[in-house]
Image (cartoon, grey):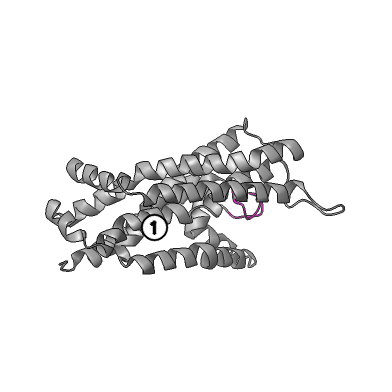
């Protein structure tokens, strides 16, 4: 297992795509962090700020998941789908013929990259939003224990997204199809579904079981609103939901894509 894990990790770090994605992610999240913080602190006269105080800070820092999770998902999916696109899957399985072990190595190999992405992404959001919240708002709250725990868990969430991306790539091995589905789901389907479910009292709690909702629950904050207006799961339950998505995709991928003859 160690040899397979090392081989998969080397495949990742010797390609340029993952760090190019990280550069784009950092720039994007820093910009969005500024924009969202500005929406909280620069309010027209007579209007009420969407969020204030600690709620505004936590919602801003939660952007690493709210709008940033597409990046680790794509990085993770590329780790798997590139094997099929460039026909290297045959050589990989000759080196590690146990397909379950191969998949587990793939899943584990993206964790370090995911943690790096989480650190950089969370840092970009804080660098973009915190100065504005401190100068024009009620404060950045970077000394608050709940805020700091949310920042740390945001890093973990990004790493989990990378693992889910690999699992999804094993289920949808076509690289173009996987990326299109990821973009459509993260940018349109889930945000609309969460907003729609939130408008129906009987269904509002279901939004927390969607992938992004579970990730927000693990962080303990959501850019969609304050913790009092957005239904969040307990953190242990949120972690189980996210691990469940990764495990479910991986098991189905192992029983379908990785069960077929590969030539």
Most common SS among magenta residues: loop
Q: Is residue 212 in view?
A: yes
> Which class describes the residues within 10 Å of circle 1: few (<14), some (14-19), or many (20+)?
some
Percent from the top left, x then y, of residue 201? 63, 65
Quick check: 246 left or right of 187?
A: left
Measured from the top left, where is residue 61 in percent x and y?
Answer: 59, 44
The secondary structure type at the circle numbered 1 is helix
- The correct choice, above or below, for 70 with respect to 4 in the image is below
Q: To which residue does mark 1 refer?
A: 245
Q: Which quadrant of the figure contains the C terminus? A: bottom left
| Residue positioned most to the top | 143
**In the image, is 254 to the left or to the right of 132?**
left
Q: What are the residue bounds of the magenta stretch?
A: 221-231
Q: Is residue 113 magenta?
A: no
Q: Residue at x 32, y 54 (%)?
A: 79
| x and y percentages locating residue 193 in the rendered image | 56, 67
> Extreme right residue here?
46
Q: Quadrant of residue 205?
A: bottom right
Q: Is residue 135 above or below residue 31?
A: above
Q: Residue at position x 38%, y 65% from top?
A: 178
- Of the 4 image quadrants, the one containing the N terminus is top left
Q: How many marks?
A: 1
Residue 244 in view: no
Q: Which residue: 64% across, 42% down? A: 129
Q: Position of residue 24 (x, y in %)?
A: 49, 51
């Amino acid at each position: 297992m160690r040899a397979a894990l090392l081989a998969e990790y080397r495949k990742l770090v010797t390609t340029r795509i993952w760090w190019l994605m990280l550069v784009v992610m950092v720039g994007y999240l820093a910009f969005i962090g500024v924009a969202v913080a500005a929406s909280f602190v620069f309010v027209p006269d007579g209007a009420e700020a969407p969020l204030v105080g600690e709620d505004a800070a936590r919602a801003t820092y939660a952007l690493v998941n709210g709008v940033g999770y597409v990046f680790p998902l794509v990085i993770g999916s590329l780790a798997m789908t590139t094997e099929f696109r460039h026909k290297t899957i045959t050589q990989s399985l000759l080196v590690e013929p146990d397909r379950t072990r191969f998949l587990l190595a793939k899943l584990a190999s993206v964790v370090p990259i995911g943690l790096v992405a989480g650190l950089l992404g969370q840092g970009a959001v804080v660098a973009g939003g915190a100065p504005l919240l401190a100068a024009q708002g009620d404060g950045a709250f970077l000394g608050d224990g709940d805020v700091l725990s949310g920042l740390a868990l945001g890093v973990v969430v990004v790493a989990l997204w990378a693992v889910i991306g690999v699992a999804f790539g094993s289920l949808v091995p076509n690289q173009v199809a996987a990326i299109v589905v990821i973009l459509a789901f993260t940018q349109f389907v889930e945000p609309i579904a969460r907003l729609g479910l939130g408008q129906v009292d009987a269904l509002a709690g279901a939004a927390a079981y969607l992938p992004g909702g579970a990730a927000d629950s693990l962080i303990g904050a959501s850019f969609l609103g304050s913790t009092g207006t957005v239904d969040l799961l307990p953190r242990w339950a949120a972690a189980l939901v996210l691990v469940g998505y990764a495990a479910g995709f991986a098991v189905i991928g192992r029983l379908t894509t990785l069960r077929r003859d590969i030539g």
